[in-house]
Image (spheres, grey):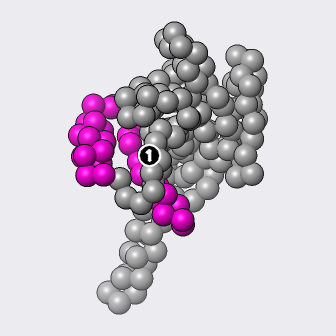
Amino acid sequence: MKRLIPLCFILLTAILYPGYGKDCSPWIKAKLDSVSASYTVTEDGEFKWEYPVEFAVDGRTQLVFINSKSKDFLSEEVLEIWSPVYSCDGALSPEIANMLLADNAEHLVGSWEVKTSSSGISYVLFKAVCEVETIKKMFLVYIFYIASTADELEKALTGNDRY
Protein backbone atom coordinates (compact mmCIF):
# COMPACT_ATOMS: atom_id res chain seq x y z
CA MET A 1 0.00 0.00 0.00
CA LYS A 2 2.83 2.41 0.83
CA ARG A 3 4.20 1.92 -2.67
CA LEU A 4 0.86 2.77 -4.27
CA ILE A 5 0.61 6.24 -2.74
CA PRO A 6 3.66 7.70 -4.55
CA LEU A 7 2.59 5.99 -7.79
CA CYS A 8 -0.92 7.48 -7.51
CA PHE A 9 0.59 10.91 -6.87
CA ILE A 10 2.79 10.66 -9.97
CA LEU A 11 -0.13 9.51 -12.14
CA LEU A 12 -2.42 12.24 -10.82
CA THR A 13 0.24 14.89 -11.49
CA ALA A 14 0.69 13.62 -15.05
CA ILE A 15 -3.05 13.84 -15.66
CA LEU A 16 -3.60 17.27 -14.13
CA TYR A 17 -0.50 18.94 -15.57
CA PRO A 18 -0.27 18.11 -19.26
CA GLY A 19 3.09 18.00 -20.97
CA TYR A 20 3.96 19.58 -24.27
CA GLY A 21 3.19 17.51 -27.31
CA LYS A 22 4.00 18.24 -30.92
CA ASP A 23 5.10 21.29 -32.86
CA CYS A 24 2.04 22.47 -34.79
CA SER A 25 3.85 25.31 -36.55
CA PRO A 26 3.85 23.78 -40.05
CA TRP A 27 0.09 23.25 -40.32
CA ILE A 28 -0.77 26.50 -38.49
CA LYS A 29 1.50 28.43 -40.87
CA ALA A 30 -0.10 26.69 -43.85
CA LYS A 31 -3.62 27.54 -42.63
CA LEU A 32 -2.72 31.19 -42.04
CA ASP A 33 -0.89 31.48 -45.37
CA SER A 34 -3.87 29.96 -47.19
CA VAL A 35 -5.99 32.99 -46.18
CA SER A 36 -3.16 35.51 -46.73
CA ALA A 37 -3.14 36.36 -43.01
CA SER A 38 -0.65 38.94 -41.83
CA TYR A 39 0.89 37.38 -38.73
CA THR A 40 4.08 37.26 -36.69
CA VAL A 41 5.61 34.62 -34.46
CA THR A 42 6.41 35.71 -30.90
CA GLU A 43 9.51 34.81 -28.87
CA ASP A 44 7.43 32.08 -27.22
CA GLY A 45 6.61 30.55 -30.61
CA GLU A 46 2.99 31.71 -30.63
CA PHE A 47 1.41 32.87 -33.85
CA LYS A 48 0.06 36.42 -33.40
CA TRP A 49 -2.61 37.45 -35.90
CA GLU A 50 -4.34 40.82 -36.03
CA TYR A 51 -7.63 39.38 -37.19
CA PRO A 52 -9.97 41.73 -39.08
CA VAL A 53 -13.33 41.39 -37.35
CA GLU A 54 -15.57 40.62 -40.32
CA PHE A 55 -18.83 42.09 -39.07
CA ALA A 56 -17.28 45.35 -37.83
CA VAL A 57 -18.18 48.35 -39.96
CA ASP A 58 -15.64 50.49 -38.12
CA GLY A 59 -12.55 48.52 -39.22
CA ARG A 60 -11.97 46.85 -35.86
CA THR A 61 -9.36 44.14 -35.50
CA GLN A 62 -8.67 41.66 -32.73
CA LEU A 63 -5.38 40.04 -31.74
CA VAL A 64 -5.49 36.25 -31.73
CA PHE A 65 -2.66 34.08 -30.41
CA ILE A 66 -2.26 30.45 -31.46
CA ASN A 67 0.13 28.35 -29.42
CA SER A 68 2.47 26.49 -31.78
CA LYS A 69 3.01 23.62 -29.34
CA SER A 70 0.20 21.26 -28.54
CA LYS A 71 -0.21 19.76 -25.09
CA ASP A 72 -0.88 16.15 -24.22
CA PHE A 73 -3.95 15.80 -22.04
CA LEU A 74 -4.94 12.26 -21.13
CA SER A 75 -5.02 10.53 -24.52
CA GLU A 76 -5.67 13.71 -26.53
CA GLU A 77 -3.47 16.32 -28.13
CA VAL A 78 -4.91 19.80 -27.44
CA LEU A 79 -4.05 23.31 -28.58
CA GLU A 80 -4.66 26.73 -27.03
CA ILE A 81 -6.00 29.70 -28.98
CA TRP A 82 -6.65 32.94 -27.10
CA SER A 83 -7.38 36.62 -27.50
CA PRO A 84 -6.71 39.48 -25.05
CA VAL A 85 -9.62 41.74 -24.17
CA TYR A 86 -8.92 44.00 -21.22
CA SER A 87 -6.23 44.93 -18.71
CA CYS A 88 -6.12 46.86 -15.46
CA ASP A 89 -3.75 47.58 -12.59
CA GLY A 90 -4.40 45.18 -9.72
CA ALA A 91 -7.35 42.86 -9.38
CA LEU A 92 -10.44 43.03 -11.56
CA SER A 93 -13.43 44.80 -10.09
CA PRO A 94 -15.98 42.41 -8.56
CA GLU A 95 -18.52 43.53 -11.17
CA ILE A 96 -16.29 42.57 -14.10
CA ALA A 97 -15.17 39.31 -12.47
CA ASN A 98 -18.77 38.27 -11.77
CA MET A 99 -19.84 39.23 -15.29
CA LEU A 100 -17.06 37.05 -16.76
CA LEU A 101 -18.02 34.10 -14.56
CA ALA A 102 -21.67 34.38 -15.52
CA ASP A 103 -20.83 34.76 -19.22
CA ASN A 104 -18.68 31.59 -19.20
CA ALA A 105 -21.89 29.56 -19.04
CA GLU A 106 -22.93 30.98 -22.42
CA HIS A 107 -19.98 29.53 -24.36
CA LEU A 108 -19.79 25.96 -25.59
CA VAL A 109 -16.23 26.56 -26.74
CA GLY A 110 -13.85 28.78 -24.85
CA SER A 111 -14.00 30.66 -21.58
CA TRP A 112 -12.85 33.87 -19.95
CA GLU A 113 -9.53 33.69 -18.13
CA VAL A 114 -7.65 36.22 -16.00
CA LYS A 115 -3.84 36.23 -15.93
CA THR A 116 -1.90 38.48 -13.58
CA SER A 117 1.59 39.63 -14.52
CA SER A 118 4.47 39.85 -12.07
CA SER A 119 3.97 43.63 -12.05
CA GLY A 120 0.36 43.21 -10.86
CA ILE A 121 -1.47 43.92 -14.11
CA SER A 122 -4.54 41.74 -14.65
CA TYR A 123 -5.28 40.65 -18.22
CA VAL A 124 -8.63 39.24 -19.36
CA LEU A 125 -8.52 36.83 -22.29
CA PHE A 126 -10.94 34.62 -24.10
CA LYS A 127 -9.30 31.22 -24.52
CA ALA A 128 -10.23 27.92 -26.13
CA VAL A 129 -8.39 24.67 -25.52
CA CYS A 130 -9.50 22.10 -28.07
CA GLU A 131 -8.42 18.85 -29.63
CA VAL A 132 -5.91 19.49 -32.43
CA GLU A 133 -7.66 17.48 -35.15
CA THR A 134 -10.89 19.40 -34.55
CA ILE A 135 -9.06 22.72 -34.78
CA LYS A 136 -7.41 21.62 -38.04
CA LYS A 137 -10.84 20.89 -39.55
CA MET A 138 -12.51 24.07 -38.29
CA PHE A 139 -9.54 26.45 -37.98
CA LEU A 140 -11.19 29.61 -39.29
CA VAL A 141 -14.41 28.93 -37.37
CA TYR A 142 -12.44 28.78 -34.10
CA ILE A 143 -10.49 31.93 -34.96
CA PHE A 144 -13.65 33.82 -35.90
CA TYR A 145 -15.48 32.75 -32.73
CA ILE A 146 -12.59 33.57 -30.39
CA ALA A 147 -11.83 36.92 -32.08
CA SER A 148 -15.43 38.07 -32.35
CA THR A 149 -16.27 37.05 -28.77
CA ALA A 150 -13.21 38.87 -27.43
CA ASP A 151 -13.80 41.95 -29.58
CA GLU A 152 -17.43 42.18 -28.50
CA LEU A 153 -16.45 42.33 -24.82
CA GLU A 154 -13.53 44.69 -25.46
CA LYS A 155 -15.88 47.10 -27.20
CA ALA A 156 -18.48 46.80 -24.40
CA LEU A 157 -15.95 47.31 -21.59
CA THR A 158 -13.74 50.01 -23.09
CA GLY A 159 -15.20 51.25 -26.36
CA ASN A 160 -11.63 51.04 -27.69
CA ASP A 161 -9.82 48.75 -30.10
CA ARG A 162 -6.60 48.22 -28.12
CA TYR A 163 -6.27 44.51 -28.73
In this view, the residue in front, 129 or 54, is: 54
Residue 157, image x and y in percent?
Answer: 38, 34
Rendered view: 65 above or below 94 = above
Task: Report whether residue 138 is seen.
Answer: no
In this view, the residue in front, 23 or 163, is: 163
Residue 10, image x and y in percent?
Answer: 46, 74
Farthest residue toward the bottom?
Answer: 2
Task: Report whether residue 152 is seen.
Answer: yes
Residues drawn in magenta: 93-121
Quadrant where the C terminus is found in the figure? top right
Q: Which residue is mark 1?
A: 124
Quarter of the image for residue 27 reads top right
Instruction: Name the residue rendered at 26%, 41% in the picture.
Output: 99
Categorize mark 1 by other alpha carbons within 10 Å: few (<14), some (14-19), many (20+): many
Identify which amino acid the numbered label 1 is placed on.
Val
Quarter of the image for residue 54 reads top right
Instruction: Name the residue rendered at 53%, 29% in the picture.
Output: 161
Quarter of the image for residue 81 reads top right
Residue 13, image x and y in percent?
Answer: 44, 69
Q: In the rendered picture of this protein, how many numbered marks are placed on residues?
A: 1
In this view, the residue in front, 20 or 103, is: 103
Residue 31 located left or right of residue 105:
right
Secondary structure state at the residue bearing disc 1: strand
Q: Is residue 105 magenta?
A: yes
Instruction: Name the residue rendered at 75%, 41% in the picture.
Output: 41
Residue 107 located left or right of residue 127:
left
Residue 22, image x and y in percent?
Answer: 67, 48
Instruction: Name the residue rendered at 40%, 87% in the picture.
Output: 3
Residue 108 located left or right of residue 68:
left
